[in-house]
Image (cartoon, rainbow, N blue to C red):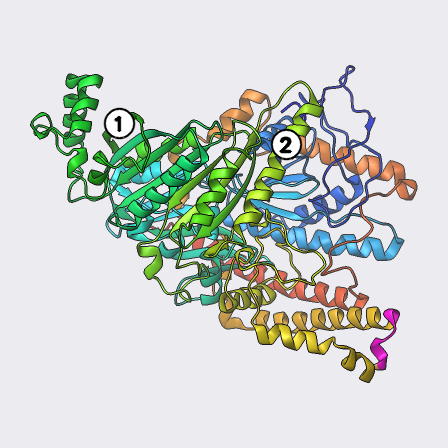
């Protein structure tokens, strides 16, 4: 990470520096040299902050103005030790960046206050721009949980970090589990394993549970139990105006429908309840296949897909096409409880017998199919449906290495296998769905990992889908890729080094390789993009004259238009702008209609459009009219009292997680004490804030402003009347929230019963 880290100054004091990097966290493009903001004490790692300290102070003041009594969410400033630790703690090292602020709530009510404070900060910044005419950049809002997405943290953004909200509450009798917005798959698996249960979430334990649901959520049991988004029972969402909404299939149906595979961008999911299934043990088979040529690799991919189409739904499998030209790694697992014993006694018996046989005898007996040597095992390779066919079938490969069959516990042996497969590092990824494994697709992935590979670290992982995923109707949830049978994961990697120019060169090679592979796949029949933010890795025509191929779109027309309508209703000002792309292929009649509307005949009959300046003016006026209409619709929606029935539960919604917190010491508090400051008071952050105010008063109006040439597209032309309407609307909501908070405070005096509480 040498290319990302900043060096500490020799005198250990802040100095005037400049920063050149991505502007992804700002709604604009320009950047001017400015001094780094002061800190209460010199940080252990010097930090270069990109942004105006006055804009930072505007947002801090706005967020603090919405802090209610008893709320202790953290505000981390650039330059503090904790800020440095948090911004570096990401899975993808290439995503390490310099945010404007990191906000860490611990309760749902604190998330609500932060969202309200952010929108107030945007409003106050716009007022400052209108009053002084200065060009100030408006930081965009990032929401992160597992910190794996490319949108988790971005340069110059304000990060709403849910990493302190990791509570897991298991109801073993009802077979349900409720997790908070910052919980990861590891947190979920570790708690469910104590009860002999599992929930579909993801095969990578470092993923955030909520992020997995927003993208669909593939797991080892998805062919049998569906996706993670198919097993959501209810959720709690903080929408753009800061209100809490509980959603389920029968309540706030639009929110529930959109968060199940819709890619996000509607609100902040603070809690989600999932359906669980009993599962303790699974059968696992792994080995490597020789693939010395691209032709052999294509044959392996085709034969593997053919075998998978006839395998039972309890079987999951993936193959890893490495770029070292030598091996293809295979993994197959079965969760068939009819042939895989679920008790710990059988698991211990299997391990004891295999240890006594020895590694050589074990492998020979399994490969030869000698039943006499396997009668004393609870299960074996030849007894598992689907996997038994692979005793002689090597998918066309000549040699097979490192064959190993074993019984494993699901939550702490099978799930952690992904830690080695998806290790942290410099990563650039893309993902595609496929309905069939055609010869063209097999050829593209084979050539990409052979002659066209950028290095020996990158790879393509092709995993199984289908089964229960295909049986669920497309309209039931937002995820509508119900005909997929394969998931193609393109992962480009490169290593850090001392020479920054070489590192940047290696990165460009990897980026080109990922883009090329994804762009070739999108022209294949049966390919579809995903709802992940990384679905934008494929190239399309920027001129707009040609239609993108079918594989570029990630939703169908019905679900795509519905998602866009929900976004417009729930977040009309685009507060949650960093979400996945939502695109769908328009019908032929829609394209013909749009072409006719811009035909030469139409332009002749409408002379008002002939002038470019008039056309530009009409376009701006139309966009402004649409924004005003959106504000009117959202005001009508806000005034609907029946939709506000959840607002009074902000202070009591996290009660189920408080029991576990009171019974155990918070690990964050011990970290705070070891670093010499208290998390509850956070003197360091308060000193930073006071120092920023002093600096702002010292510079006054003569301080150079910098940031961006434009601000948010949804807000860039708001009139004074619209801003005043926003003020009145916010005051009305704040007044209503005050009444709700008073009522909820009285209710919180009576403790609610909680059972089966657990937190990681």
In the displayed image of the protein, which residue is found farthest to the bottom? 605
Residue 62's spot in the image, x, y percent?
Answer: 70, 49
SS label for mark 1 = strand
Q: Main secondary structure of the magenta part?
A: helix
Q: Which residue is mark 2?
A: 507
Q: Which residue is mark 1?
A: 404
User: Residue 598: which quarter of the image?
Assistant: bottom right
Q: Is residue 520 visible?
A: yes
Residue 543's spot in the image, x, y percent?
Answer: 72, 59
- At 36% from the left and 31% from the top, the residue drawn is 417
Residue 518's spot in the image, x, y percent?
Answer: 55, 46
Judge from the rendering whether residue 747 lies leftward or rightward of residue 348; answer left or right.
right
Judge from the rendering whether residue 269 lies leftward or rightward of residue 4; answer left or right.
left
- At 71% from the left and 64% from the top, the residue drawn is 726
Q: Residues within 10 Å of mark 2 (few under 14, many from 20)?
A: many
Q: Which mark is residue 560?
A: none
Q: Is residue 72 above or below residue 576?
A: above
Viewer-side residue, 261 vs 48: 261
Q: Is residue 646 above or below residue 459?
A: below
Magenta range is 607-613
Judge from the rendering whether residue 470 lies leftward or rightward of residue 110; answer left or right.
left
Q: Which label's residue is closer to the chain start, 1 or 2?
A: 1
Viewer-side residue, 325 vs 640: 325
Distance Cα–Cα, label 1 vs label 2: 35 Å
């Amino acid at each position: 990470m040498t290319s990302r880290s900043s060096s500490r100054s020799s005198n250990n004091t802040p100095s005037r520096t400049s920063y050149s990097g991505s502007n992804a966290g700002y709604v604009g493009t320009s950047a001017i040299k400015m001094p780094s903001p002061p800190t209460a004490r010199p940080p252990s790692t010097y930090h270069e902050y990109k942004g105006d300290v006055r804009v930072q102070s505007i947002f801090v003041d706005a967020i603090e103005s919405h802090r209610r009594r008893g709320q202790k969410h953290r505000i981390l400033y650039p330059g503090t030790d904790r800020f440095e630790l948090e911004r570096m703690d990401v899975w993808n090292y290439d995503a390490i960046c310099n945010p404007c602020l990191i906000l860490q709530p611990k309760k749902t009510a604190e998330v609500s206050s932060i969202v309200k404070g952010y929108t107030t900060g945007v409003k106050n910044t716009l007022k400052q721009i209108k009053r002084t005419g200065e060009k100030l950049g408006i930081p965009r809002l990032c929401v992160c949980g597992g910190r794996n997405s490319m949108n988790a943290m971005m340069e110059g953004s304000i990060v709403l970090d849910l990493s302190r909200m990791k509570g897991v509450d298991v109801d073993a009798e009802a077979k349900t589990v409720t997790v908070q917005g910052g919980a990861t798959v590891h947190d979920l698996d570790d708690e469910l394993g104590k009860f002999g249960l599992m929930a579909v979430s993801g095969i990578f334990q470092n993923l955030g549970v909520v992020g997995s649901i927003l993208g669909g959520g593939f797991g080892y049991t998805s062919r049998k139990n569906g996706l993670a988004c198919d097993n959501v029972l209810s959720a709690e969402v903080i929408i753009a105006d800061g209100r809490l909404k509980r959603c389920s299939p029968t309540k706030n149906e639009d929110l529930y429908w959109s968060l199940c595979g819709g890619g996000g961008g509607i609100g902040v999911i603070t809690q989600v309840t999932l359906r669980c299934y009993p599962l303790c043990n699974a059968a696992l088979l792994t080995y490597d296949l020789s693939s010395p040529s691209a032709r052999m690799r294509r044959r392996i991919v085709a034969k593997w897909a053919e075998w998978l189409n006839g395998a039972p739904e309890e079987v999951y499998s993936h193959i890893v096409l490495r770029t070292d030209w030598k091996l293809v790694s295979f993994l197959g697992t079965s969760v068939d409880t009819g042939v895989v014993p679920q008790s710990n006694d059988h698991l211990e018996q299997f391990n004891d017998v295999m240890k006594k046989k020895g590694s050589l005898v074990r492998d020979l007996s399994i490969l030869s199919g000698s039943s006499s040597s396997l009668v004393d095992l609870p299960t074996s390779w030849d007894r598992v449906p689907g996997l038994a066919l692979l005793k002689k079938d090597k998918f066309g490969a000549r040699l097979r290495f490192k064959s190993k069959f074993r019984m494993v516990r699901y939550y702490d042996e099978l799930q952690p296998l992904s830690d080695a497969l998806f290790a942290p590092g410099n990563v650039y990824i893309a993902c595609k769905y496929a309905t069939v494994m055609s010869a063209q697709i097999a050829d593209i992935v084979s050539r990409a990992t052979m002659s066209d590979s950028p290095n020996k670290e990158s790879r393509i992982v092709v995993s199984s889908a289908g089964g229960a995923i295909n049986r669920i109707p497309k309209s039931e949830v937002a995820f509508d890729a119900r005909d997929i049978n394969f998931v193609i994961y393109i992962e480009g990697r490169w290593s850090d080094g001392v020479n920054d120019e070489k590192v940047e060169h290696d990165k460009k090679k990897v980026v080109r390789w990922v883009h090329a592979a994804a762009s070739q796949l999108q022209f294949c029949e049966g390919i579809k993009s995903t709802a992940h933010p990384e679905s934008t890795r494929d190239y399309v025509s920027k001129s707009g004259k040609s239609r993108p191929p079918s594989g570029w779109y990630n939703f169908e027309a019905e679900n795509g238009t519905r998602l866009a309508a929900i976004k417009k209703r729930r977040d009309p000002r685009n507060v949650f702008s960093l979400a996945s792309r939502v695109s769908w292929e328009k019908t032929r009649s829609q394209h013909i209609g749009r072409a006719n509307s811009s035909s030469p005949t139409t332009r002749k009959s409408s002379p008002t459009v002939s002038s470019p300046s008039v056309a530009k003016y009409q376009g701006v006026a139309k966009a402004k009219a649409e924004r005003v209409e959106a504000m009117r619709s959202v005001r009508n929606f806000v005034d609907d009292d029946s939709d506000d029935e959840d607002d009074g539960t902000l202070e009591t919604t996290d009660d189920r997680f408080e029991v576990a917190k009171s019974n155990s010491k918070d690990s964050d508090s011990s970290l705070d004490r070891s670093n010499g400051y208290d998390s509850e008071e956070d003197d360091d952050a308060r000193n930073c804030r006071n120092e920023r105010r002093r600096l702002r008063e010292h510079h006054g109006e003569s301080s150079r402003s910098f940031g961006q040439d434009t601000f948010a597209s949804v807000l860039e032309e708001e009139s004074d009347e619209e801003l005043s309407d926003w003020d009145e609307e916010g005051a009305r909501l704040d007044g209503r929230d005050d009444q709700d908070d008073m009522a909820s405070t009285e209710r919180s005096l009576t403790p609610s019963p909680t059972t089966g509480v657990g937190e990681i």
